[in-house]
Structure formats: structure tokens, C-alpha cells
Image: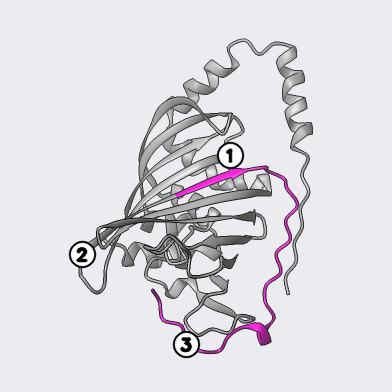
Amino acid sequence: MVARQHRRRDVAVVAAGLMLCGTGCGGGADSQDARAAADPVEVLHRAAGTLVRAGTSKALTSMEMATGGTRVTIRGEGVYDYTAQLGRLKVQLPQDPAGTSGQRPITELLAPGALFMKNRGAGVPADKWVRVDTATLSDGNLVTGGATDPLAAAEVLRGTRTATYVGKTEVAGIPVRHYRGTADLAAAAKSASEGNRAPLSAAAKGFATARVPFDAYLDDQGRIRKLRHRFSFLNGRQKDTVAVASTTLLYDFGVPVTVRLPKPEDIYAGKIAEN
């Protein structure tokens, strides 16, 4: 069992920032914009580390995939502890053609090198968890779970090769700076944390291309507020390329997060096929 809980006081940080601005912030935003435009690649390389220092957050995820002439979207919601590299998401599968969902939301626990799923279906007892070694997945669990691990998504940016600063905008009412670029998964794997190194390396080999176009939106503290990746992988049956757009929204930094991993006796011992 692993239990981690963090409490942060972002209000104090914001208040301190307001006090500083009260003493004179003239030109501060312009200076930040100048730095953002001058070296966007370096800014993006630091983004994952900034999340670790932020501690925790809530997360919303969506994964859009075109398959069989139909575009489907899988949505998730939960929390993540970037220091412990532990997260919990409720992932809702898309509705069937009749307009109903045939399965309850899947509960996913994200851990270094592992994905735990409950309500997985496919004959797995309702009270059991399925454990998947993410290093064995051809996509490194960037796609398989129906949601991209928030820290893994951020660590993809460690492999940023080219990037441009698009400009200022807002995400959920928060001022952000928008960057657009391309990351290399193999390069990201070399610079990633220990828990994500093997999964990202597997993705670099398993995807149709190791190059990942992205749009990243960072707030004034350099924290990722929104991140959108576009992955391409080969459909093993039809041998065609499938495009997947994965979007992660991060908010409520510093929220208390507790993630308890399943006990060994609660993990299903049967073999689960990779989808």
C-alpha cells in the first residue's frame, strides 16, 4: 500500500505575487514574453520539473480517436501527485451507437511503470484490479489506458526539438502562454524520470513515428495548464495508421491527493490482452 498526501497553499504564492506587483510590475509581463519567445524549447524542457515542484493538481483528460469511420472520445477526471508519481483517474468509455455506455467508468491508478485498472471488463471480476507493466506496452501507456498519464505527458516535452511561442491566451480563465512544437519520444525517454524512461522508450519504438506534434499552454509560473499531443500508431489488424489526439487539462494545484495502490491479493492474476 502506498499513501501520499500533499497540501500546498497556492493562495499565499498568489498573494505574494500581488504584493510584489503592488510595488511595481511595470514591464514584467513584457519581459516574460520576451524570454518565452527567445527560447521556447528551453522553457518546455523545464515544464515537467515545474510540475514536480508544484506538487499536485486535479486533471481532466480526453482522447480522440478515429476508428472505423467514426470519431470517438474517451474522457477522464482525477488527481495526480507529481512528486510521488501517483495518480487516480475515472475514465469514461464512449457511448455505443445506441447512445448508451455499456460499462461503468474504469478506475485507473497511475504509478511509476505500472497502470492499475478496475471495472476493466473482459471477464475480470468486478472487485479485482488489473495490473499492466507500462514498459511492455507498445505505446508506453500514452494511449492504451484511454488517458495519458499527466506526468508522462509533461515529460514528452523533455524531448522538444523545435518549438515556437504563439502568444498569450487563456485556459479556463487563467492567463497562459501558448507554445507549439514537435517532440521526439526517444530524446524524451533519455531525459525522463526513472519511472517514465522505459515506457517512453517503448512508445518511441512502438508508434508509427517517434515525432509528436503538440500544443502546450503554460501559466505565469511555468506550470502546464493544457497540453495536447497528436500521436500516430499502427493498427495491428488493418495495418493502417491511427491518429490520436490526447488533451490534458491541469488545475487546482496543491489539492490534497491520496492514492492507495491495490494489495497483491486484490490484483487479477489472469492474462489481459493489450487492446
Mark 3 lies on residue: 271
Q: Nearer the viewer, residue 45 or 265?
A: 265
Q: CA distance from mark 3 to mark 2?
A: 27 Å
Q: Secondary structure at mark 1?
A: loop
What residue sits 39% from the left and 68% below the top? 202
Q: Which mark is residue 179?
A: none
Q: Which mark is residue 240?
A: 2
- Tag 2 or tag 3, which sits nearer the N-term? 2
Asked which colour scheme the image uses, the reply is one colour
Residue 5 place in picture, x, y as percent = 77, 57
Residue range highlighted in magenta: 247-275
User: Picture quarter containing residue 76?
Assistant: bottom right
The single residue placed furthest to the front in the displayed view is 98
Mark 1 lies on residue: 223
Q: Amino acid at mark 2?
A: Asp
Residue 171 place in picture, x, y as percent = 53, 33
